[in-house]
Image (cartoon, rainbow, N blue to C red):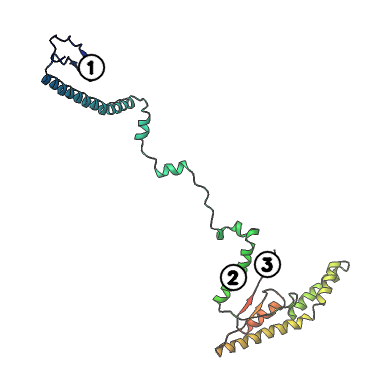
Amino acid sequence: HFGSSRSPPRARRSRKSLSPAGLQIATMSVAAVPVDAIAAAGSAADTVQASAKRRRLLETEASPVAESTSAGSSDQDGCSGGEDDVATQPPPTAEELQLAVPEGPKPPKSYRNTDFLGSHGARMIRVMCELQEPRQRLEAQGVDNIVMFFGSARAKPKAQYEAALREAEAKAAADPQDAMAAAGLERLRKQAFLVPMFDVTRDLARMLTEWSQKRVADGKAPYVVGTGGGPGMMQAANEGAYQAKGPSVGFGISLP
């Protein structure tokens, strides 16, 4: 309407809300307001908008503080604080975790587990032990060469045989109807030929031990008497080594 002879109609005033506090600025007609006034009004509006924006930011920053304050007051009153309570609780200790999650059983070492070592699955391990453990003991004693003596376990020295024979004859004579006593006497009489064998075996083991001792004196490897560690001929061989003041080895066994 610039340059017109007629006065322009009065512009309607529009009100625009710029802040929650109700700050407003009136927008007037361009023809009724000079250019400088329009610029001043625009800068004033910008200032009001910036002030309102800062106020909103302050209100936003102050709201968590108010919420936490209200939560704290509710806790003091005995009311539940919700998620804030969970966040403020201290973390569980190691003892509490251990009690909450129980540990499983701790089995012993397999080589100390007697149930496993006596099972069928460990049979091969037991067989290996029967070889390795005696080997370690023999090495500790310096035993490397062994001469094994085999013979009947029923053989007896002469004095022991004669005493056993007299006892068997008296038992059979006391009850002629006792079949077991008669069979025992007959079996003992058949073993009479072993009596001189017992003495021979003992003498042989003694001579072997004496010969081995001479080898040691000459700087040679010794030979040791070895038996099954039982009675009869085995006992005779061990006695012979003992009479020569030498060592002997008895490989004893136990049947299942």
What amino acid type should be assigned to the residue bearing mark 3? Answer: Ser
Residue found at the very far bottom of the displayed protein: 218
Task: Report whether residue 226 is seen.
Answer: yes
**Quadrant of the rendered image containing residue 180:** bottom right
Q: Residues within 10 Å of mark 3 (few under 14, many from 20)?
A: few
The N terminus lies in quadrant: top left
Residue 71, how many percent across, how many down? 32, 27
What amino acid type should be assigned to the residue bearing mark 1? Answer: Lys
Residue appearing at x 22%, y 14% in the figure: 15
**Residue indicated by mark 2:** 132
Residue appearing at x 54%, y 53% in the figure: 107
Marks 2, 1: nearer the viewer? 1
Q: Residues within 10 Å of mark 1 (few under 14, many from 20)?
A: few
Q: Earlier in the sequence, mark 1 or mark 3?
A: 1
> Disc 2 to disc 1, how far (Cα)?
103 Å
> Disc 3 to disc 2, how far (Cα)?
17 Å
**Quadrant of the rendered image containing residue 89:** top left
Marks 3, 2: nearer the viewer? 2
**Residue indicated by mark 3:** 254
- Foreground of the two, 76 or 165: 76
Circle 2 sits in a helix, a strand or a loop, which is it?
A: helix
The C terminus lies in quadrant: bottom right
Residue appearing at x 35%, y 34% in the figure: 87
240 above or below 256?
below
**Residue indicated by mark 1:** 16
